[in-house]
Amino acid sequence: MSALPFLLAVCRRPGAIADDELAVLDQTAGLAPGRDLEVMRLLDDDCPDPRSLDLSAWSGVIITGSPLSLTGPLSTDPAHAALRERVLGLSSRLVEEDVPTLGLCFGLQAIVLALGGSLRDDTGEELQAPVMTLADEGCTDPLTAPLAPSFRAYVGHSQSVAELPGGGVVLATGERCPIQMGRWGRNVYGTQFHPEITTAGMRVRIEAYGDAYYPAHERAAVIERCDAADVRPANRILTDFVHRYRRPGPS
């Protein structure tokens, strides 16, 4: 019996990073696009209204990261406003219906804003792999309990969430960024860090984000500190999320 696919809500334009996200989902979590993974690009003009989706058609939903901001002025990308409306509408439904969800960085921030929360500008993190520490809830949560009490994970963000509204619980914390992972209900998760980024994938992002998330002259040092980190425990979150929520399709 085949399994229901997962839905990937892509919040960035096509390119090397979007390609890497798809490759990691295939290689790490066994989600092959077109077979186990359906892709919905929220920046496309023909993207359906997420409020009209039949969310029962998928085993779960993954919301990607994005270089675009959910607060402040819109970028020059004409689809930016549509992206913001779509991802907030989708996030609200996912929490309301407790659909298995993994929001990645931008995805976590979208969930928080959809629930009436806010973002802060003083806890951004350059491209690196700081230590994440499980909170009490994280030590017992089915998705995070298999992890060690502390683990390394890649980050790269200019904003972070200020709190978890709507009954959210903190699962993991960081020294600079206090809220690194949270959960709503039983099945909606969000991470400020990036469990979908491997060591090779971070190289892709270092190349793409030069002089944005780090000064260009520090490129060698950024590569060295990122290459030195073992982030495989964080990558396991993505794999375990898929294994936990994969559901059989109709017979």
Image (spheres, rainbow, N blue to C red):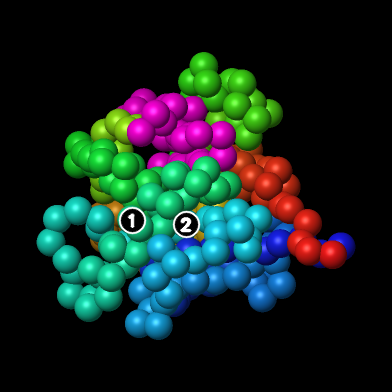
Single out the residue that lies furthest toward the top: 136
The vertical placement of 150 against 227, above or below, is: above
Can you tell which mark lies on residue 88?
A: 1
- Residue 107: x percent and y percent? 41, 52
Assess whether residue 14 is covered by the magenta stretch: no
Nearer to us: label 2 or label 1:
1
Could you tell me the amino acid type at mark 2?
Ile
Can the viewer see residue 10 in this picture? Answer: no
Q: If the image is split into quadrants, where does the N terminus sit? A: bottom right
Q: Residues within 10 Å of mark 1 (few under 14, many from 20)?
A: many
Can the viewer see residue 115 in this picture? Answer: yes
From the image, tell me which residue sits under label 2: 63
For the record, the magenta segment spans 166-192
- Residue 13: x percent and y percent? 39, 74
Q: Residue at x 64, y 67 (%)?
A: 37
The total number of labels drawn is 2
Q: Residue at x 33, y 56 (%)?
A: 88
Marks 2/1: CA–CA distance: 11 Å
Q: Are marks 2 and 1 in contact (CB under 8 Å)?
A: no
Q: If the image is split into quadrants, where does the C terminus sit? A: bottom right
Query: Which secondary structure, mark 1?
Result: helix
Q: Residue at x 23, y 76 (%)?
A: 77
Could you tell me the amino acid type at mark 1?
Leu
Would residue 30 be found to the left or right of residue 156 on screen?
right
- Residue 233: x percent and y percent? 63, 38
Query: Which secondary structure, mark 2?
Result: strand
Q: Residue at x 61, y 21 (%)?
A: 140
Q: Earlier in the sequence, mark 2 or mark 1?
A: 2
